[in-house]
Image (tube, rainbow, N blue to C red):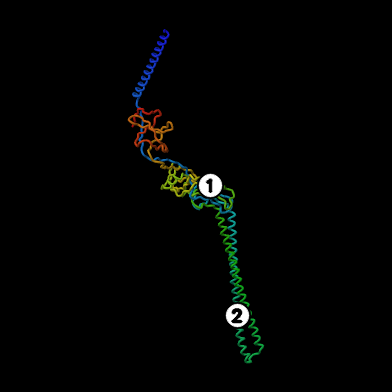
Amino acid sequence: MRSRRRLICLLLGLSLLLGACRTGESTEQASTEISTEASTETSPARAVKVVSAQIGTLTAQKTTTVTIEPLKESSVAAGAAGRVDQILKREGQQVAEGETIIVLDSDNANLQVQNAQLALDAARINLQKAQRATSEGGNQLSLQLQSAQTNYNVLKQQYDESSALFAAGGIAKTQLDSLQAQLTQAEATVLQLQNSLAQNQRASSEDLSLLRVQVSQAETALQQAKDALAEANVKAPFAGEISEIFTEQGEFLGAGSPAFKLVSNEQQLAKFSVPPEDAAKLTAQKEIFIRYQGLDYGASIVRSSTAPNNQRLVDLTAEIYPSDTPIPSGSVAQLNYSTNESSGLLIPASAITLAGGKNYVFVAEDSTARREEVTLLDEVSGQAIIEGLAEGSQIIHPLPNDLRDGANIRILD
């Protein structure tokens, strides 16, 4: 009986002890909640700045390298062989059309000109001599033929008269036969002289033609020698800039060997590669601007082609407008251009935070920061296109690292 009472008393004591503990915990929890609420209500407002979310277009700023090339360039070759005597212009210097750049040793070329001139003089003398001989020989034969023809005519008349007398019995037969023999001889002489004159004329004509050919050949040889002498001066075929010299003084330069490289600065080309979608937009523009050493050079695109071995790029070629300070050929410049990527609700990309694989922004509502989930559609150059907010929403930006959802805020102007 006494043991049962002790057990009942022990159970009652434990019940009272547990109740007291629970009461203490509830009191402590309530005290903590009250303290937290009081702390929240009394915390100072956080000063923030906001931007308005507006419908806009996302513009991408892009850069590509540009290679400057001359519209016209030439590796000028020597027209004659010889030792390099002088180099009058060097790399980077401007030259005029027809200006001498390299001078070759011309002693041998001068000697060839002199020999060719002597050969021409000799050919002309031979021709003149043959012409005089032909004229004199022809005149002499003509006079002989004329005399023989006169003699023949006289004998013919005498023979005709003697034939009449012989028929009348006035002369002997021997006299008539003698006249006939003389007439035959005179006729043979005329025929011989006619043949000699014809042969002389033919021979003279052929000889003179041959001599005239020799004179023409000598004239051609002289002109070639003069041309070779002129080729001793290697000249610029057009105005431009010397970009490279391929030889040095004292070296031997063969005919047809490159002597120097000349580029034209009057017109220059800019070559670069961009994606196909950008190429179409750039081509549609009236002009582009290429930047080199702080200066912008205007240019217009003249042609495009697919880049070799790269179907994802298009090669563009632009013609640079003339300038008083042209870009040196072979230089690398820069082209900055912008493209419109997409349109939508536009906000700063740095206003977006990532948590749990989702994108959030903090919106200012009635002096309170509210965290709102958004969908990121596109981002370029620090700007982002999003969905999930209304146009005109006040986005907190710059975003404080310790800002929490529901925090008191004060918007700065």
Q: What element carries label 2?
A: helix
Q: Quadrant of residue 353?
A: top left
- Tag 2: amino acid: Gln
Q: Mark 1 points at which residue?
A: 244
Q: Is 224 drawn above or below residue 355 in the view shown?
A: below
Decide which of tag 2 and tag 1 comes sooner along the chain: 2
Element on which disc 1 rests: strand
Which residue appears farthest toward the left when viewing the image? Answer: 366
Q: In this view, does 231 lie to the left or right of 380?
A: right
Q: Which label sits on residue 298?
A: none
Q: Quadrant of the C terminus?
A: top left
Which residue appears at 37% of the width and 29% of the height? 405
From this viewpoint, which residue is outermost toward the top? 2
Give residue 388's position: percent from left, percent from top.
Answer: 38, 36
Left or right, 397 with reference to 140? left
| Between marks 2 and 1 in the image, the one whose residue lies nearer the viewer | 1
Which one is in front, 15 or 309? 15
Query: Residue at coordinates 64% horizontally, 85% vertically from top-left?
Result: 180
Q: Tag 1: residue type?
A: Glu
Side of 358 relative to 124 (left or right): left
- Asked if one can make out residue 393 in the rendered structure from this viewpoint, the answer is yes
Q: Which residue lies furthest to the right in this view?
A: 174
Q: Position of residue 60 (x, y in %)?
A: 42, 40
Q: Residues within 10 Å of mark 2 (few under 14, many from 20)?
A: some
Query: Residue 64, position in %: x, y?
Result: 46, 42
Q: Name the residue under label 2.
A: 149
The spot of residue 333 in percent (x, y) is 47, 43
Residue 37 vs 360, above or below: the answer is above
